[in-house]
Structures are given as structure tokens and as C-alpha cells.
Amino acid sequence: MARQALLAALDEGWADPARLYREGRRARLLLDAAREAAAEAVGCRPDELVFTPSGTRAVHAGIYGSLAGLRRVGRHLVVSAVEHSSVLHAGEALEADGGSITEVPVDRSGAVSPGAYAAALRPDTALACLQSANHEVGTVQPVAEVAEACRAAGVPLLVDAAQSLGWGPVDAGWSLLAASAHKWGGPAGVGLLAVRKGVRFAPQGPSDERESGRAPGFENIPAIVAAAASLRAVRAEAAAESVRLRALVDRIRARVPQLVPDVEVVGDPVRRLPHLVTFSCLYVDGETLLHELNRVDFSVSSGSSCTSSTLTPSHVLRAMGVLSEGNVRVSLPTGTAEADVDRFLEVLPGVVASVREKLGAPVSSPAPAAPSGDLTVDALGRRCPIPVIELAKVIGDVPVGGTVTVLADDEAARLDIPAWCEMRGQEYVGEEARERGAAYVVRRVS
């Protein structure tokens, strides 16, 4: 349907919708129809919604416009610690310009506490931001409860609905909403921003007569028409497809820990998106794991630092305090067959085992050994998962009550060593900064 809409709009929607000649009026009709369809899916009025060149631009326009509209209130922004990078980057820019930002922590499932969110709101808070659902682990946030706390404090709430909008409307109470068409299967290069009537908003930067002055420049009408058509199409199938995909994801969540040793499935097991599942494997190089899965025709992604050019683990996994090494994020597209999931579960154990073997990872829990005092492991200059692998190799060489100190300068060790301790039932004593990297101390409990 979206492809047909795109092709038709290429023929009929090429003209400038701001002009009064026949082709321009025809383009305007297509644009207005797309706006009405998108507004119906969002749950807002058509004149409250504008199209932007991307979801990131929608987020930035929403944040900067809200902060400018409420500049007399203050320049304080509240966000969750697991927001999309577009939100966090906007917060960093605000701080650099003299404003302030508060990040609300999340629990181990990736969810915020409405009470903690309410406590972060201040008299000078101009805007709060919250995802409807997390893009990495699928956890659904308590939008309605946070929106109520924001309403009581008189603070507008911007909801990033990029991940969830294709599955249904966002809970009521939001003031602004941003989304991106490619997340629901539409064309790339189309975002949307909805601003409720009555919300104080001042668009920033040069503007023109297009999109209420909030997204200047010639609208990409064929892509916008296709985006609205695809949103309507996926929504029509969302109820039935979400039930089917949720069952497949439940199978992955249950079977992966049974088939692969030393795995942590992350994200809320109940309050989550129906199509997304994320897990982390101990003693695995995430980049190698993704390449090996790609070789057997499975395209997955990861939040592991060893797949990132920044060499730091995903900020989402870090905020949750879960294992980041060997992280695999599986997103099931609409129409995923049960046989595809079965084959994934069939090949995954062998792929993980082969990567672990190449890295020299331990194949089982360490056996008790004679007391030999405390140990120090030098893993400086070695990237994840090597520091954890070296720790696992020697933990059995110290007596119960003894310690292993791991020297490491890989940022992922700060997250993965405590996560390993929780998974293996050992005690994480703490971290001590060194001239190079840090020393992480683990006490053997059993």
C-alpha cells in the first residue's frame, strides 16, 4: 500500500503545495490528506501536526521550540537516562548554553519510576521528555503516570513515540509528540511533530510559510504520503500481528537462556514492545557475534561497546546496569515466520560457542581450588569481553573470601564486571581509579 501511494504521489504530488495553480492545489490535497491520516493515528488534530525531514529533526524542533516558548519559566530539562541520543544531544547543547538537565534513572528493566520523575521536576523546569518505549530493549514506559505528574507541576511533556506509534496510539496526557516514519516501515526521511493547542511553543531558526513555520523547506510530498499510508496499513494489522510476534518473542526470551549458557535477557518481560528482544552473552565479542550471525543470514544489531566506534557501551544498557558484552538486539519485522525463529534458535548456540572458543573463554563455572591468596589480572589495553574472560578464568584460583583485582581501561569493564558478579553469584567490591584505567575488585563468594 505504501509503495503504491509513493508511486502515485510521484506522479500527482510533484508540484509546490504552497502555489495556487492546478498542480499545486493537487499537491496540497495530497499533503492535507496525509496529515489527516497521520493525525488520526497519533490522536491529535491535523492542525497540531507537522511533517519534518526526520525523527531527529522532530525531536530537536520540539525541544528547542518548547524551551524557547517557556524561557521565562527556566531552562531546566528533565529526561530519562535511556532516551534516544537525539534527546540527550539536545540536552548536552542546552547545558553548553547555560541551561541544565536532570536525567531520571531507570530500574534494571529499563523503566522509570513516575515518583522519581515527579521528584525531578522543579519550578524552573521548562520541559520533560520521555520515550513511549525504549528503542534498544523494548521496555514500555509509564507515559500516563509521568504525564499526570507533569500536568500537576505545569510542565509540558514531549513523548518520543518512534518505536511504538506503529503499534498503537500513545497514552493520553502528552503535550508534544515526535516520531519517525522508517520505524513503522515507512520511507526514511520523514518525521512528524505534534504540538497540542495551548502549549507554549516558539519555533527556532529561520522559518517560512510551510508546516506552520515549524519545519521550513519544500515538503517531500511523495514520501509523506507513503509514510501516512504505511502508518495506516500497519495500524490496521497491529492488533493481530502484535499477538503473533509477542508469542515468538516469548519463545526467544525463554529458549535462549536454556540453549546458551551465561546469557542475560534484558528489558521488562511484560511491559514491552511485541516485536523486540535483547539479550547479552558473557565472554563474547559483540562485533564478531553479529558478523557470524550475518553469515548465516540473520541481521541483528547490538549495544555492545565492541560494535561501537566510541568504544563505550550503550548508554541504555549502562543506565540499566545490565551486561553489555555480547549484546544482541533482535527486532522481528511484520510477517516474520515461526520457522525463521526456529532456525535462529537452532544456529545461535553454535555461533556463540564458536566465538567463545576463539576468545579462549571458560566453558564452565570455575572449580574450587586450593587457597592461593588474592590475585591481580592485568587486562590493560584489552577490549571487552577479554577483561571478564580473564576474571572468569582465575576466580577459581582464589579461596572463598579471596579477591581478584582486574586492571582494565576498557570502558565496558565498568559495567560488565559488576554484571558478571551478579550473574555468577560473586561479590563486586568496587572500583578504584588508576592513572590508566581502573582496578575492579571482585571477592569470591562460592
Image (tube, grey):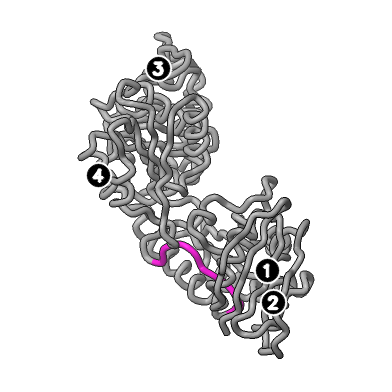
Horizontal side of residue 304 vs 26, given as left or right = right
Q: Element type at marker 2?
A: loop
Q: Nearer the viewer, mark 2 or mark 3?
A: 2
Mark 4 and mark 3: Cα distance apart in space: 30 Å
| Residue ID for mark 4 | 149
Mark 1 and mark 4: Cα distance apart in space: 44 Å
The magenta span reads 259-269
Under mark 2, the amino acid is: Asp
| Residue ID for mark 3 | 213
| Residue ID for mark 2 | 374
Q: Which of the 4 quarters of the picture holds residue 262?
A: bottom right
Q: Is residue 130 magenta?
A: no
Q: Element type at marker 1?
A: strand
**Which residue in the rendered view is the most extreme toward the top?**
20
Q: Earlier in the sequence, mark 4 or mark 3?
A: 4
Whether the residues at callouts 2 and 1 have beta carbons within 8 Å, the answer is: yes
Mark 2 and mark 4: Cα distance apart in space: 50 Å
The numbered disc on residue 405 is 1
At which x and y percent is residue 87?
47, 38
> Which residue lies at the image location 39% right of the left edge and 31% below the top edge?
193
Horizontal side of residue 59 vs 402, given as left or right = left
